[in-house]
Image (cartoon, rainbow, N blue to C red):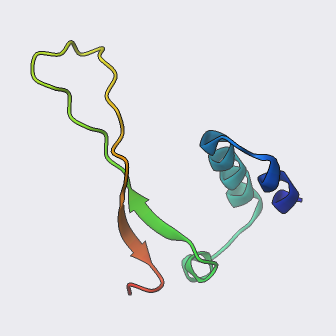
């Protein structure tokens, strides 16, 4: 069901929603989660430049850092 849906998703926000729906429907241990190839990372937002108004949009960094996966343990 989910694999055919994934092929049609083009927006990353839709892919996140699909993954969240899967997480709710499927119960996994932490070990099973990572055994399936999962990884945890962080992507930072860039700091606001000095003097810019607080409502100025701040872009996200182009890349993120890997925090945890099965390979790095």
Q: How many marks?
A: 0
Give the quarter of the image for residue 42: bottom left
Name the spot of residue 46 as percent of width and height, x first. Answer: 26, 38
Q: What residue is shown at x 35% (from left), y 69% (from top)?
A: 67
Q: Quadrant of the C terminus?
A: bottom left
Q: Is residue 21 above or below residue 71?
A: above
Depth check: give the residue in front, 1 or 11.
Answer: 11
Give the quarter of the image for residue 22: bottom right
Name the spot of residue 38 as percent of width and height, x first. Answer: 56, 72
Q: What residue is shown at x 55% (from left), y 76% (from top)?
A: 30
Q: What residue is shown at x 21% (from left), y 12% (from top)?
A: 53
Task: Give the left or right position of residue 17, taking residue 41 as reference.
Answer: right
Q: Is residue 40 above or below residue 9?
A: below
Name the spot of residue 31 as percent of width and height, x first. Answer: 56, 83
Give the quarter of the image for residue 34: bottom right
Name the spot of residue 36 as percent of width and height, x first. Answer: 64, 78
Depth check: give the residue in front, 71 or 8.
Answer: 8
Q: What residue is shown at x 41% (from left), y 62% (from top)?
A: 41
Q: Is residue 30 above or below residue 55?
A: below
Q: Quadrant of the N terminus?
A: bottom right
Instruction: Check the image and name the residue furthest to the left.
Output: 50
Task: Give the left or right position of residue 60, taking residue 40 as reference.
Answer: left
Depth check: give the residue in front, 48 or 34.
Answer: 48
């Amino acid at each position: 069901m989910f694999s055919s849906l994934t092929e049609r998703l083009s927006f990353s926000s839709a892919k996140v929603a699909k993954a969240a729906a899967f997480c709710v429907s499927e119960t996994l241990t932490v070990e099973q989660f990572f055994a399936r190839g999962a990884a945890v990372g962080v992507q930072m937002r860039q700091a606001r430049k000095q003097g810019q108004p607080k409502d100025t949009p701040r872009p996200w960094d182009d890349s993120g850092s890997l925090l945890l996966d099965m390979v790095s343990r």
